[in-house]
Amino acid sequence: MTFDRHLPLDERILRIDHIQARRYSKLTGVALEIATEGILRHLRACDRMDVNPDTSAVREIIDDALNGRRVFAETTEHPRAA
């Protein structure tokens, strides 16, 4: 399933959860960069596995970004490429 890949990231997050979309829209600077990268990786992984994006995963990504932590899954082929 492709979860609205043609939409901007803000809209994709809004379709996942409006609360997380509001939190994401308030991010700036490094926290915004970390959250964007993490959410994009999550959405790509969901597309590959043909599952819907998880609200709690998006919430954790935003929480980690606010705390300055980059947390990414690793694959055997490409470290940090989830």
Image (spheres, helix red, strand yellow):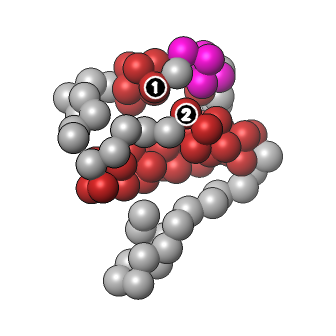
Q: Is 44 rendered above or below residue 35?
A: below
Q: Residues within 10 Å of mark 2 (few under 14, many from 20)?
A: some
The quadrant of the image that shows the N terminus is: top left
User: Taking the image as drawn, is residue 29 in sight?
Assistant: no
- The label on residue 55 is 2
Q: Mark 1 points at which residue?
A: 16
Q: What element carries label 1?
A: helix
Residue 20 inside the magenta-drawn segment: yes
Q: Residues within 10 Å of mark 1 (few under 14, many from 20)?
A: some
Residue found at the very far right of the displayed protein: 67
Label 2 vs 1, first from the N-terminus: 1
Q: State if disc 1 and disc 2 touch (CB < 8 Å).
A: yes
Quarter location, residue 81: bottom left
User: What amino acid is found at the position of numbered circle 2 in the picture?
Assistant: Thr
Q: Main secondary structure of the magenta part?
A: helix
What residue is at 37 percent from the left and 38 percent from the top?
A: 52
**How much space separates mark 2 and mark 1, taking CA atoms?**
6 Å
Residue 16 x %, y % = 46, 26
Which span of residues is magenta-colored?
18-23
